[in-house]
Image (spheres, helix red, strand yellow):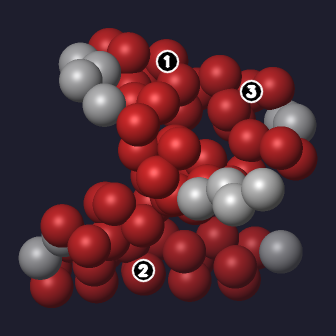
Amino acid sequence: MDLNLRKAIRNNIAGNNEKELEATILDAIESGEEKMLPGLGVLFEMIWENADESDREQMLNILEEEAQKL
């Protein structure tokens, strides 16, 4: 069986509004379930691909700060 996870996740959120997307993200984070991580990864990939250089730099700075706390 050929499963394109990225495509499935993108199809799952197609047409969602801001509130629905926020609920999806919060549910994935708050549930703490490992199975939700690929979905969050695809959402991050979508954000990254559509971010300008300034937004990418800001994301990297936040990630670096959080990594230093570990």
Specify which label sits upstream in the sequence, 2 or 1.
Answer: 1
Specify which label sits upstream in the sequence, 2 or 3.
Answer: 3
Neighbour tally class for label 1: few under 14, some 14-19, many 20 plus, Cα within 10 Å: few
Locate residue 14 relative to residue 29 in the image: left or right. Answer: left
From this view, report whether residue 51 is shown above or below residue 19: below
From this view, report whether residue 39 is shown above or below residue 57: above
Locate residue 38 relative to residue 26 in the image: left or right. Answer: right
Q: Amino acid at mark 3?
A: Glu
Quadrant in which residue 33 is drawn: top right
Using the numbered discs, state the Cα–Cα distance from disc 2 to disc 1 in whole angstroms.
25 Å
Q: Which mark is residue 23?
A: 1
Residue matched to label 3: 30
Quarter in which the C terminus is drawn: bottom right
- Mark 2 or 3: in front is 3
Disc 3 element:
helix
Instruction: Estimate the x, y position of residue 2 in percent, counting from the top left.
Output: 69, 60
Disc 1 element:
helix
Quadrant in which residue 52 is drawn: bottom left
Instruction: Residue at 74% x, 27% y: name it.
Output: 30
Disc 2 element:
helix
Q: Of 47 and 38, which appears nearest the observer?
A: 38
Q: Amino acid at mark 2?
A: Asn
Labelled pair 2, 1 in contact (Cβ < 8 Å): no
Instruction: Estimate the x, y position of residue 38 in percent, counting from the top left.
Output: 68, 55
Q: Amino acid at mark 1?
A: Ala
